[in-house]
Amino acid sequence: MSLWQKYRALAPRTRMLIGAGVVAYAGLGIFLSDVAEQKFDMVPTEKDKEELRSVIPKIRLVDRDDVLSRDGS
């Protein structure tokens, strides 16, 4: 019996509680990571944020009609 089948065999209330527990665990992790970041003085500076912005790829929109007219189609 696979893990998915065992999960599906649980009562609906139990599955709901497991799901709520996973969501609560994830939310707590997000909150605590911010607190830990501040406690260990690892908050990013403006210089760090600017360096990150330069690494993120830029997205350029191309109009479809322009592409077709250049193709000759």
Image: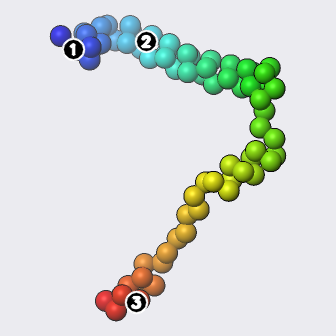
Write down the residue under mark 3.
Answer: 69
Q: Secondary structure at mark 3?
A: helix
**Residue located at (68% from left, 19% from top):** 32
Compared to 69, does 49 lie above or below?
above
**Residue located at (41% from left, 89% from top):** 70
In the rendered image, residue 67, in percent from the top left (x then y), is placed at 42, 82
- Image quadrant holding the N terminus, namely top left
Write down the residue under mark 2.
Answer: 18
- Earlier along the polypeptide chain: callout 1 or callout 2? 1
Residue 54 shown left or right of residue 22 in the figure? right
Mark 1, Cα crowd under 10 Å, few <14 / some 14-19 / many 20+, is few
- Earlier along the polypeptide chain: callout 2 or callout 3? 2
Residue 7 shown left or right of residue 28 in the figure? left
**Residue located at (43% from left, 12% from top):** 18
Amino acid beneath label 1: Ser
Q: Secondary structure at mark 2?
A: helix
> Could you say which quadrant of the image residue 73 lies in?
bottom left
Dot 1 and dot 2 residues touching (CB under 8 Å):
no
> Could you say which quadrant of the image residue 57 lies in?
bottom right
Write down the residue under mark 1.
Answer: 2
Mark 2, Cα crowd under 10 Å, few <14 / some 14-19 / many 20+, is few
In the rendered image, residue 35, in percent from the top left (x then y), is placed at 75, 21
- Earlier along the polypeptide chain: callout 1 or callout 3? 1
Tag in front: 2 or 3: 3
